[in-house]
Image (spheres, rainbow, N blue to C red):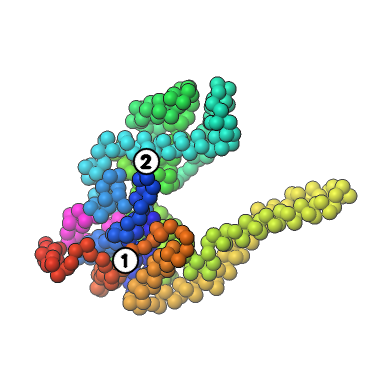
Amino acid sequence: MTAVVGILNKHAVALAADSAVTVGGTNGRKIFNKANKVFTLSKLHPVGIMIYNSASFMTTPWETIIKVYRDQLADKSFSTLKEYQEDFLKFVRTKKFYTTPEIQIAFLQNFSLDIINSIINEVANQNRVLIDNPTHESREQFLILFEEKLDNLILDWSNSKDICLEFSNYTFEAFAFYSTQIFENINQFRFVSNGIKLTEILLLKIKQVVYSILKAKVDFSIYTGLIFSGFGEDEIYPQLITVNVSMVIDNRLRYYINEDRAASISNENNGAVCPFAQTDVIDTILTGIDPSLDNIYLNNFDALFKKYNQAIIDSIGNDNQLLVAQIQQLDIEKIVKTFNEINHNIKRENYIAPLMNAVSNLSKEDLAEMAESLIYLTYLKRRITFAEESVGGPVDVALISKGDGFIWIKRKHYFKPELNQHFFENYFK
């Protein structure tokens, strides 16, 4: 896990990230505090990139990919940050050695298994006897419930219009042909070996569910958030673009632009704070309340209002059935939604707007200090509570401005700079 943040105003953009990376294995999880998450995207131009979530693309570290791209980019520049982002993804897409056919097949198989296992678990939790007491009758009942769940998922996902760009023209027939062996393997491993025989129709429905989720703009599988930030040649104010990238399937890069995590500084928008990954502490500072506590309040209000309604109905009894029916028809969800909107407006007016106003006037030094402090506070909360210390290590801080370019404020080195002068001498060659 990780915590990264970008803070923007008209002067510059400050980027900060912790150094923790969590590695899972058969014996558990281990956290290392030496990961790099902030990089220059160009050696000569004011553009940077941060990563969060997965540190690798398929099997290749993002750090390697970014630095190979940076060398290839050389002194080339683009008019907008958007063009840098598009060129980087084009580079990732065209470098086939990152995504061999065998790796693509393996990742699609894992992706499909994750989806199928989640459906099986959901069905099993509805009736544990289907798993705890596997008889012929229970297997038949499982298949009925399993198919009902598949039908509901197909109906839900088939109406989705949020499709990853490179899968917009990817037909189900092409996917079914490409994944034939994968689903034969899954059928043998997950169903036949457990005494469950799938019909051709049921197997087809499984493929349809996986196909629909594969195309959709959702982070079902392991993914990486790529945060591009800085200035294009024609941009006077900083921009921030977030792209979620997961894998390559059938030579198609599965990614989408995360519009909810973008920021653009302009004359209408003078400041922005963009947290990523573990955002609870930063969100608390921005909104004035811990997000989990906010959800508890909302759920309690919902439950209390329903109890209040029921208490009124009980007190009326059978004296006025018409009034009871009217009370039962009250749209409680609408009232709860209104309550939530009122609270959001209060948070925006009393906490978010004043803080954004302050951010818009911060100097470059203060932007960097604020970014570092937000990451440190996230680490501190993990450190002094019984939560897993999944945010930690040195905080890397960089500042990107139009005039000065990419400037490191704090940066860890795995080597001693004074012993490696050749590195700095060769950096711009």
Image depth: mark 2 or mark 1 in front: 1
Amino acid carrying label 2: it is: Phe
Distance in Å between CA atoms under marks 2 and 1: 39 Å
Residue 252 located left or right of residue 195? left
Q: Position of residue 209 (x, y in %)?
A: 46, 35
**In the image, residue 49 lies in the stretch drawn in magenta:** no
**Residue 74 within the segment the image draws in magenta:** yes
Q: Is residue 83 above or below residue 192?
A: below
- Residue type at mark 1 is Pro
Do we see residue 219 in this rendering?
yes
Q: Quadrant of residue 183?
A: top left
The magenta segment: 66-85
Q: Residue furthest right?
A: 319
Name the foreground residue: 194 vs 373.
194
Residue pictured at 13% horizontal, 67% vertical: 419
Q: What residue sits right under mark 1 in the picture?
A: 394
| Residue tagged 2 | 167
Q: Is residue 45 above or below residue 195?
A: below
Q: Residue furthest front?
A: 27
Q: Is residue 304 left or right of residue 6?
A: right
Q: Position of residue 114 (x, y in %)?
A: 43, 39
